[in-house]
Amino acid sequence: MYIPHSFAEDDLPTLLDFLEGHPLAALVTTSETAGLIATHLPLLLDRTAAPNGRLLGHLARANPQSREIAAGHTEALVIFTGPDAYITPAWYSTKREHGRVVPTWNYIAVHAYGTVSLRDDAAFLRRHLEMLTLRHETDRASSWQVSDAPEEFIANQMKAIIGFEISIKRLEGKWKMSQNRSGADIDGVIKGLGASEATADRTVAALVADRRPKGK
């Protein structure tokens, strides 16, 4: 990923926090016939696996990507994304000064690199599904558990999926939040996004303010 210095994030806890907070990711691997193949799926992060943690997930057995991984295409890129917003030059002070400005997009992206290992055992898969469900049901007033469904039904559902894990070899983080603009331009972006009715825009406004470089 192309990451100018002003947008780079290298702090491991910050990167891992982002993975946990944005669990839906794109798993990209190679394919003998298609070149590249990708699946969007929720992942769990295990921080205890050194040095960068590991990702846990599952694929449908019918998904060609699971067969490509089984055939040895195991190098993986996992793409996580977060809040984003269009940035109009109309918000920039420099537009009024000289007009030499263009639109852009603010966003967060984290790329995780590693090797996929398939886990085709029922105990791993059951534990993974229970952990995944717990992760997303805990805060609900009426939470659902895997054990709420008939055991035979769950067993049959599990036959249709295969688990995997990815030991993270490398992480890249990019917080593109107007850090390369002047203080006045940053003020304009925060004000413009903050006035939007879209929740996502206001979220990005707060991120721009949080990522504001010292002295601007």
Image (cartoon, rainbow, N blue to C red):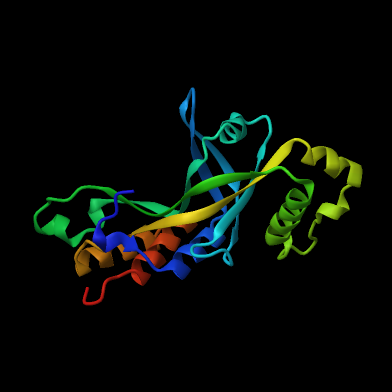
Question: Is 128 or 91 nearer to us in this picture?
Answer: 128
- The count of marks equals 0
**Residue at (35% x, 65% y) in the render:** 208
Q: State the residue lying farthest toward the front.
A: 72
Residue at (45, 63) in percent of width and height: 15
Of 206 and 30, the residue lying toward us = 30
Tell me which corner region of the image, top left, top right, bottom left or bottom right, holds residue 64: top right
Identify the residue at horizontal 54%, vertical 35% (top origin).
72
Q: Position of residue 50 (x, y in %)?
A: 53, 65
Q: Nearer the viewer, residue 136 or 105?
A: 136
Nearer to me, 84 or 174: 174
Q: Position of residue 26 (x, y in %)?
A: 51, 43
Percent position of residue 146, x then y: 81, 53
Seen in the picture, residue 4 relative to 102 is either above or below; the reply is below
Q: Is residue 202 left or right of residue 166?
A: left
In the picture, measured across the screen, residue 106 lies left or right of residue 131, that is: left
Q: Is residue 65 placed above or below 2 in the rendered structure?
A: above
How far from the left and from the top, in percent, is residue 14?
A: 45, 68
Q: Is residue 95 above or below residue 67?
A: below
Residue pushed farthest top? 33
Is residue 74 shown to the viewer in this render? yes
- Residue 39: quarter of image: top right
Q: Is residue 198 visible?
A: no
Quarter the C terminus occupies: bottom left
